[in-house]
Image: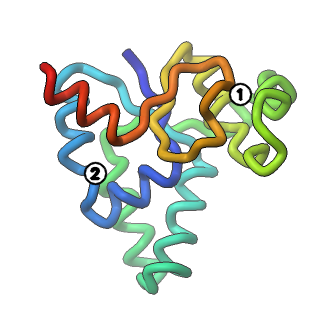
Amino acid sequence: MRMVIDSNILVRCSVGRAGLDVTKLRERNVVLATTTRSIAETIKVLVNVFSVPEDIATEEVADSTSAFEIYDESEFATHEQAAKQRLHERGAPDWPILAAAMELDADIWSDDRDFFGVGAPVWSTRNIRFAQARG
């Protein structure tokens, strides 16, 4: 199984709130992936919301995603229009995550409701934890 991780989850990983979830998924051989855009967005949130200096934010995100496959949005450009059409207007900037999931035949891990109902399996953190608890 492969899972494309949205930036809201990357923020949680970077501030220590989702690391255990990532570890458990990797123990179950789930391949975790994200996009360069999500990484840039995560760094921006750490700097602007959490007041983390940019160099430290960059290092923290690199550490927390070191085991992830990282893709540039250009690798999924053929799916850009389809992904944007499936997302609501306010969610359109997240098209690289959906396009990556479409190309990689992957699930999405996000707590962002914009992804629900777009034709790809979407896991919230709550549901991942529930599934892990069940075994």
Residue shown at 69% from the left, 44% from the top: 94
Q: Which residue is mark 1?
A: 76
Return the x and y of residue 31 as percentages of the image width and height.
35, 25
Numbered badge on residue 131: none
Q: Amino acid at mark 2?
A: Ala
Nearer the viewer's eye, disc 2 or disc 1? 2
Q: Secondary structure at mark 2?
A: loop
Q: Nearer the viewer, residue 15 or 103?
A: 15
Q: Secondary structure at mark 1?
A: helix
Q: Quadrant of residue 82?
A: top right
Can residue 69 be seen by looking at this rendering?
no
Residue 32 located left or right of residue 36 = left
Residue shown at 42% from the left, 53% from the top: 10
Numbered badge on residue 18: 2
Residue 133 located left or right of residue 67 = left
Return the x and y of residue 77 as percentages of the image width and height.
79, 30
Return the x and y of residue 45 as percentages of the image width and height.
53, 70
Residue shown at 33% from the left, 40% from the top: 126
Residue 65 located left or right of residue 79 = left
Return the x and y of residue 114 as percentages of the image width and height.
65, 41
Q: Does residue 57 lie above or below 96 as drawn?
A: below
Q: Earlier in the sequence, mark 2 or mark 1?
A: 2
Q: Nearer the viewer, residue 69 or 129?
A: 129
Q: Does residue 33 lie above or below 101 as drawn?
A: below
Quadrant location of the C terminus in the rendered image: top left
Say whether marks 2 and 1 touch (CB < 8 Å).
Answer: no
